Amino acid sequence: MTEVILHVYDVTNSGNDKTNNTILQINKIFKDGIGLGGIFHSAVQVYGDDEWSFGFCEQGTGVFSCPTTKNPMYTYRETIKLGKTSFSIFKVNQILRELSREWPGHSYDLLSKNCNHFCDELCERLGVPKLPGWVNRFAHAGDAAVEIAGNTAYRFRQAKTEIVTASKVAYRFLAGVASNNSIVSPEASGNSTRGSPRFQGAWFKNIISNGAKPSTSSELENGDEESLHHQQKQDGGGAPLRSNSHRGV
C-alpha cells in the first residue's frame, strides 16, 4: 500500500499582479477565515515524486505531471493526506493511461471539468476519499448557478408555450359557443329533450360582459336549474332532460 497525497495551490496564473493578489486575499478570507472555500488548483501524488493533474490544451491529453509542490503556474498552499491505496504501481499507471485518454485538454471547463474534478476522479479510482469540499466549492457553486439559470429559462419557455396553447383552446371553445348559438333553429327547441342542453345567448353575453370570470360550481348549478325551468316553460312543460350515462372524455 502507498500513500495518496493531495497538493493544493492558490490560482495565481492570471498574468496580472493585482488580480493574483486579489485571488490570494479571497482565498485567505473565504478559506482561512471562514473555511468556505476559494479558487484553487490541485494535484495528486501517488508512487514517486511527481504529482498528476489536468489542464487545458488544444490537442492531446490534458493530463500532465510535474515535481510535487513545484507547479510553476500557481502558488503552493498546502498538502493533504487522503489515505492509502492498495493498488500496485503497475495498476496506478494503467489508471493514469486510461484517464489520459478520457480527459483531452480541449474538454477542460472551469466550472464543470477542471483540475479538481480530475483529482476527484483519480482518487475515486484509487479507492481513497475524494477532495475536501472546500477545494472545489466555488466551481460547484458556479456550475449549479449556471444549471439553475438554464433550467429557469427552459421553464419560462415551457410555461409560455402552455399559456399560448391554453389561450388557443379557450378561444376555439368560445368561438364554437357563439357559432352554436347563432345557428340554433326553431325546430331545435322542440327537440330539447335529446342530447345536451344548448347554450343560451343571454348566458354567453353574460360571460363576455363579466370579462369571462370563472364561475363557482354552485353558480353553474344554479344557472343550469334556471335554464332548465325556462326551457321547460318554452316547451310547454315537457319532460325533463335525460342524463346521459356515457360521459365524454
Image: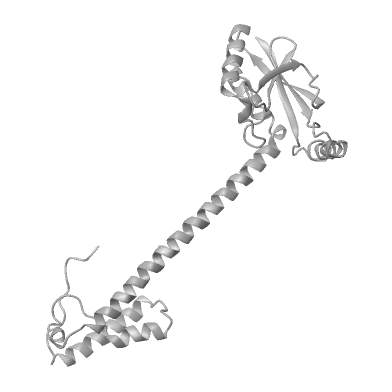
Residue sitting at x 62%, y 35%: 112
- Quarter that holds the C terminus: bottom left
When asked about the image quadrant of residue 171, the answer is: bottom left
Q: Is residue 85 above or below residue 137?
A: above
Give residue 103's position: percent from left, percent from top: 60, 24
Q: Nearer the viewer, residue 34 or 91?
A: 91
Indicate left or right for 173 with 154 as reference: left
| Relative to 126, residue 162 above or below | below
Q: Residue 141 at x, y = what percent?
A: 66, 42
Q: Position of residue 203 (x, y in %)?
A: 32, 85
Q: Quadrant of residue 59?
A: top right
Above or below: residue 48 compared with residue 240? above
Q: How many marks?
A: 0
Residue farthest toward the front in the current orientation of the protein: 59
- Rendered-image quadrant of the N terminus: top right
Q: From the viewer's perspective, is 171 left or right of 185?
A: right
Q: Residue at x 60, y 24 (%)?
A: 104
- Whole-percent x and y of residue 75? 82, 27
Foreground of the two, 212 or 239: 212
Q: Residue at x 61, y 11 (%)?
A: 93
Relative to 158, 68 lies left or right: right
Which color scheme does this rendered protein use? one colour
Q: Quadrant of residue 146?
A: top right
At a point 15% along the width and 83% down the height, the residue shown is 188
In the picture, measured across the screen, residue 165 lies left or right of residue 98, that is left
